[in-house]
Amino acid sequence: PLVIRREDYRPPAWLVPDTRLAFDIDPAATRVHATLSVLRNGAHSEPLRLDGAGQTPLSVVVDGVAVNDWRVEDDQLFIPLSGDAHSIETEVEIAPDRNTQLMGLYASGGNICTQCEAEGFRRITFFPDRPDVLSRYSVRLTADRARFPVLLANGDPVAQGDAGEGRHWAEWNDPFPKPSYLFALVAGDLQVNRDSFVTESGRTVELGIWVRAADLPRTDHALHALKLSMAWDERVYGREYDLDVFNIVAVDDFNFGAMENKGLNIFNSRYILADPDTATDYDYDGIAAVVAHEYFHNWSGNRVTCRDWFQLSLKEGFTVYRDQGFSADQGSAAVKRIEDVRGLRAAQFPEDSGPLAHSVRPDEYQEISNFYTATIYNKGAELIRMMATILGPTAFRAATDLYFDRFDGIAATCEDFVACMEEASGKDLTQFRLWYSQAGTPRVSASLEHQPGGGRATLRLGQRVPPTPGQPVKQPMLLPLKIRLFGAETGRPLTDERLVLLDSNSETIVFEAVTERPVLSINRGFSAPVVIESDRSPADLAFLSRHDDDPFARYEAMQQLMLDTLVAGAVEGRADHEAAIAAVADTLDNPELDRAFVAEAVLLPSEAFVGDQLSSVDPEAIFRAREALRRDLGRRLEDRWRTAYAQAPQIPYVYSPEEKGKRRLRNVALGYLAAAGVPDAATLAFRQFEVADNMTDRQAALTTLVSSDDDLRIAALDIFYNRYADNPLVLDKWFQTQALSSRDDAAATVAALAEHPDFTLANPNRARSLVGAFGVNQRAFNRPDGAGYRFLADQLIALDRLNPQTAAKLLPPLGRWRRFDEDRAALMREQLERIVAQPGLSKDLFEQASKSLD
Ligand code: DPP
Ligand code: ZN
């Protein structure tokens, strides 16, 4: 396979300052006429080389004259050119309605749209399809007026008119030079929800969210989130919007969550459409976060873009950090941080310790689509957060101002970003840069000793970065650890919060005159994305869960206590539950804590996260240990769960941090009552399922029922299916809930659902809702007979023929064989080998499967 290496980067041989595109739209045969002004970049004699993807040009014209000395080789069009500046015209014909990869120009629900990141533009027209070629685009669309009444592209609208024969045209012009991956167009039968936003400097921007007519009532939340995002980016980062219009289009078939095309974002409809009856609180949160994320890309990604795809985290890590800050400001920052860390641990930590581990700035790839990962996005965001912590808020803002200012209109690198952080703050980040080049999650050991009688406390810290593929030996990293000591007797802080910059393999920190036995609070706020290995006793963890003044650390102490209990239960078959039960009781009893925080704090770590702590994952033992603790917590605290359950949120549904918190805690309580096996659990759940005026409560009730043995689960599934049969996003929930069931027959249910008439691999959301969800159902997926592995491989092989990019994203659960016993490992490897041996396998799936075998 062809490996692309970061160190092979060379500037483009030819630049394309201006691009004119004319699309004659027809789903079966769209003509694309491109006119590129090209400029030789430096002194060289290379021909012009344009990327394509299987097409042959219908014509090539140089400076107005048809030529035939071009050739197409390895999907690239070579055109010899004598001068330094030329006008190049090409024409191709493409078929959006046969584009099942959903990359380039494709059809979704009768409309035509684009997805160009990372390398989809070459599937539309011949072009130097790399992010460091920035061009000014003007676009003319012509299409049937009845079928495609709406014609949109990047930038501002210029003109429109009648084209005769029932066709019409529209012209759009984007004054900002941009890379081809940000190109977008939409032709469709769409309705718009309009609003406007007046920027800081007084310019009025017309906003529009375009959807199918039936979906129009579900667009208000997204539109509101867009306006909040625009104001937030002005206030927090000083970034103002720059075009007269900002359009968003929602489509049902989409590989990603959304795409930040300049002035014309295209979204997976799941991140736009919401009303209380069909979307959960979690969906509402996700929509606001993704709308903000794509909007923020206008500066971190579009105005300042990436030099090459190895720099992907430059825009993604930074933009995730920005959207996390936005969401934190909309509600509880503490709960947001807990959710983000939970996500990091669920998705990124396993990636970082497995066969697909890569650094935040990778050194090589075969298929760039495989690098839109939790490492690039979420660990990348943690890197920015660490720099913000090290710099402090004022210097960090000065540094981002400098970065936006200096690299506006430029394709930049991660190094450029770090250099701005240094220049604006005067701090030396030389060692910090290892975070960009070394993969793997650092492990930090921490042990605290105290001389009784008012003496000295000594904190010993150590770090170890585990080996990862291609990186057997690691250097010590710079780890910003927020630390504080609390007095075990009084519960009061003994020190201020300190930021320790651990930069060597081991370090000792001495605290003098410590008057009572200290308890260590470390990595407060999750200041570094590391694993802490401390020798804190269950009593000390329980103490911190009551007294720590950092909400994250408080949550973390509780989680660690539960985790230690679950690990003991899984390894030894039994565990002492008392400390965990008492800590949960105290948390529930504390009236000062916000309900959303309480709900997070009393939730048990996932089966997968428990598995990550063990040298060999035993899914059955973990499941049993977790169910035992859930049952005990449910039974012993039954009164408290009933009290929490009785705190009903407002009707009708209100989406606010307080009401969300109430719903969450109430649904957690329902889960514990069911785990306790109280006789009325299923009836409670079913009643909630029936009377709920919102999807949050309805889906939570369904989730509880679907893992139960009660026949009400069948009734609930049928009612749910019939009620939402015409809403694809809600049907996704129907599939997903069953794929995540903890029942013994979950694997068989999933296999049967794959044959359901509403199941299709052609729609990525649907594929993810069943196949993707099943891959994270640890016990069902890892059945000892290997049925789960075979099922996943069958689905991936079938999906690869339609949509390699989405298939490759669903592969990682099969690559975790090293973490399991020999029998399971052999069964997983067998399926990976079967995948690799498929004739005509995509390079997407080949790269993931072959790396997973190593
Ligand atoms: N750049 C998109 C996003 O993360 C993914 N294509 O916003
Ligand atoms: Zn992004």
Image (cartoon, grey):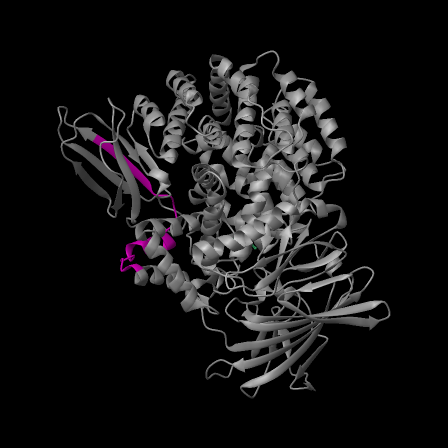
Q: Is residue 40 above or below residue 475?
A: below
Question: Can residue 34 be seen in the rendering of this structure?
Answer: yes
Horizontal and vertical percent for residue 102?
A: 66, 55
Is residue 527 positioned above or below 37 on the image? above
Magenta span: 425-448
Is residue 447 inside the magenta stretch? yes
Residue 663 lies in quadrant: top right
Q: Is residue 711 magenta?
A: no
Q: Is residue 274 rendered to the left or right of residue 6?
A: right
Could you say which quadrant of the image residue 682 lies in?
Answer: top right
Can residue 362 be seen?
no
Q: Is residue 671 left or right of residue 278?
A: left
The foreground one among 511 and 646 is 646
Residue sticking out furthest to the front: 202
Where residue 325 appears, x then y in whole percent? 45, 47
Q: Which is more toward the observer, 670 or 418?
A: 670
- Please tell me how many numbered marks the rendered image carries: 0
Residue 660 image position (x, y, % from top left): 55, 33
**Residue furthest top as drawn:** 679
- Answer left or right for 73 relative to 107: left
Residue at the image position 28 percent from the left and 38 percent from the top:
483
Measuring from the top left, give residue 851's x and y in whole percent: 49, 49
